[in-house]
Image (tube, rainbow, N blue to C red):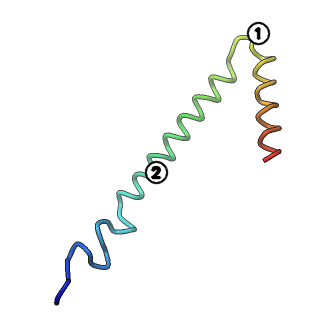
């Protein structure tokens, strides 16, 4: 068959449902969950002197989020 290449067949370089795609998605999800949990723990246990600034920053972020 002229012009046929197994590399350019209907299932090109990677299968869209390959296990690698699922593993990468799962790894990104776990990393995001781990990172956000660490950030929440960090923000929930700061010194008392930082509470005012934390609330101010959170309020500003909320205003920006609602405005967009």
Rendering quarter of residue 12: bottom left
Rendering quarter of residue 67: top right
Which of 26/3 is in front? 3
In this figure, which residue is indicated by the disc labeled 2? 26
Residue 53 x %, y %: 77, 18
Secondary structure type for disc 1: helix
Q: Residue at (59%, 35%) from the top-left corner? A: 36
Q: Looking at this rendering, what residue extends furthest in the bottom direction?
A: 1
Residue 39 x %, y %: 61, 29
Q: Residue at (26%, 75%) from the top-left corner? A: 8
Residue 38 x %, y %: 57, 29
Q: Residue at (17%, 88%) from the top-left corner? A: 2
Residue 40's place in the image compared with 19, above or below, is above
Residue 55's place in the image compared with 19, above or below, is above
Number of the front mark, 1 or 2: 1
Residue 30's place in the image compared with 38, above or below, is below
| Category of crowding for the residue at label 1, using alpha-carbon neighbours closer than 10 angstroms: few (below 14), some (14–19), many (at least 20) | few
Q: Looking at this rendering, what residue extends furthest in the left direction?
A: 1
Rendering quarter of residue 50: top right
In this figure, which residue is indicated by the disc labeled 1? 49
Q: Is residue 56 rendered to the left or right of residue 9?
A: right
Secondary structure type for disc 2: helix
Q: Is residue 30 rendered to the left or right of residue 40?
A: left
Report how many numbered discs are placed on residues in the image: 2
Residue 51 x %, y %: 78, 17
Q: Are marks 1 and 2 in contact (CB under 8 Å)?
A: no
The Cα–Cα distance between marks 1 and 2, rounded to whole angstroms, is 38 Å
Quarter holding the N terminus? bottom left
């Amino acid at each position: 068959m002229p012009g046929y290449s197994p590399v350019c067949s209907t299932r090109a370089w990677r299968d869209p449902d390959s296990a690698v795609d699922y593993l990468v998605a799962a790894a990104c999800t776990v990393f995001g969950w781990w990172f956000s949990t660490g950030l929440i723990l960090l923000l929930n246990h700061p010194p008392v002197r930082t509470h005012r600034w934390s609330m101010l920053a959170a309020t500003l972020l909320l205003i920006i989020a609602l405005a967009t």
